[in-house]
Image (cartoon, rainbow, N blue to C red):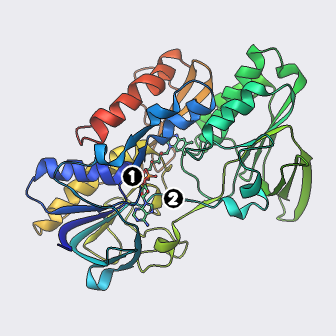
Amino acid sequence: DTHFQILIVGGGNAGISVAAQLLRKDPNLTLAIVEPSDKHYYQPAWTLVGGGEFALEDTIRTEAEVMPERAVWIRDRAVAFVPDQNQVETATSGILTYDYLVVCPGIQLNWGQIKGLPETLGKNGVCSNYAVDQCSYTWETVRNFKGGTALFTSPGTPVKCGGAPQKVMYLSSDHFKRRGILKQTRVEFCTAGGMLFGVKKYAAALEKVVARYGIHLFFRHDLISIDGPQKKVVFKVTDRQGHTTEVTKSFDMIHVTPPQSAPDFVRESPLADAAGWIDVDPHTLRHRHYDNVFGLGDATNTPNAKTGAAVRKQAPVVVENLLAALQHRSLPATYNGYGSCPLVTGIGRLILAEFDYNHEPQESFPFDQARERFSMYQLKKRVLPWMYWNKILKGTA
Ligand code: FAD
């Protein structure tokens, strides 16, 4: 069959969560998930893999294992949306039609936008936690580092987990410190952005962490090219007046966070806003122009931190509103922009940032979460991965 009451594009964190919750509420729905990958990843733990603190294989399961029993898995790539005709085109399975569509294909990593990066990634001390086949090389690089210049970059585009470009730096710095080579190391954070973190309370706490490790901060530094064999990088630097210059730096190791965007097939579709993201109402998560389309996760234009934590709060909103729409009721649920960033600040240390659309803290625990804590590190390393596989993907959290 090629018609479904509910069609979901993307079987990642968001797609599987929404499918599992919908089928729990109504097992008789006909629901399909379009997902090309035969593997499912718990990406938040890649930070710990890069820090030598988590086994890569524990971040990977087969997609078949996480697929809800009653969902139909269409193992294919969506290539185009025709929302006026309730159609999704796929690469090899033809056209699928739906009553309701949920769009959540995640964010696209644009490695090629940094000249020279694809050729040198994974060698010459050039690493990234942003890909499953790369985060082990981060640990290899950090473990074998002998002092010198260690650069950590963050691009000018939106990224998933805005804290991840810093977490890897703090973990690495802690390793250097424990091995007694931090003093012979110049650690630099080079970010295209203008500040350390968007929420004041946590930014202030992170400034202390930066000072503890002696990290040098460079704002408005956007990585544009990299020469692995020569160990040189070029940044486009913008001053406060908006003038740009190019600055070359040398490195002994560099962790790169790639520029990111909405997936091309979303950007080129009628579902996209001017910047390419899925254009949804930030509170109901329904598409602004197509009433039978919902969107969530990293691919939408909602101005929250793009995290799995945000997906956890968005999924039940989409589920409630979609079921209401099916029954021609008004949409009851709203999303407040909650996002969370477990900021790993060293081995066994973590600041649990939680905040909403207004960049106001929304903390879950009855203590000051801006303090570095061992307990919150354990939450990230042990509790959250377990919750992901056993609760979130099962639709019970
Ligand atoms: P994804 O989980 O990425 O899933 C998207 C799915 O869509 C994929 O399965 C993909 O194969 C599929 N897809 C892509 N194209 C198509 C297509 N054309 N057709 C059909 N399917 C398609 N979040 C936190 O909450 N806390 C953290 O500490 C944290 N740390 C992170 C650290 C790193 C290094 C990274 C990379 C991410 C981190 N995140 C963290 C972010 C978190 O992983 C994402 O926000 C979350 O996975 C978003 O869910 P999603 O479903 O939107 O996208």
Question: Which residue does the image show at 25% across and 66% down from the upper left?
Answer: 7
Comparing 335 with 164, the one in front is 164
Residue 111 picture location, percent across and down: 67, 58
- Please indicate whether residue 164 sits to the left or right of residue 100 in the image: right
Q: Quadrant of residue 184?
A: top right
Q: Is residue 369 visible?
A: yes
Q: Mark 2 near ligand 1 (CB under 8 Å)? A: yes
Comparing 202 with 164, the one in front is 164
Residue 26 picture location, percent across and down: 10, 53
The answer to whether the residue labelled 2 contacts the one labelled 1, judged by CB atoms less than 8 Å apart, is no
Question: Which residue does the image show at 48% across and 25% down from the upper left?
Answer: 381
To which residue does mark 2 refer? 107
Q: Residue 38 — which label?
A: 1
Nearest to viewer (mark 2 / mark 1):
1
Q: Which is nearer the N-term, disc 2 or disc 1?
A: 1
Q: Quadrant of the N terminus?
A: bottom left
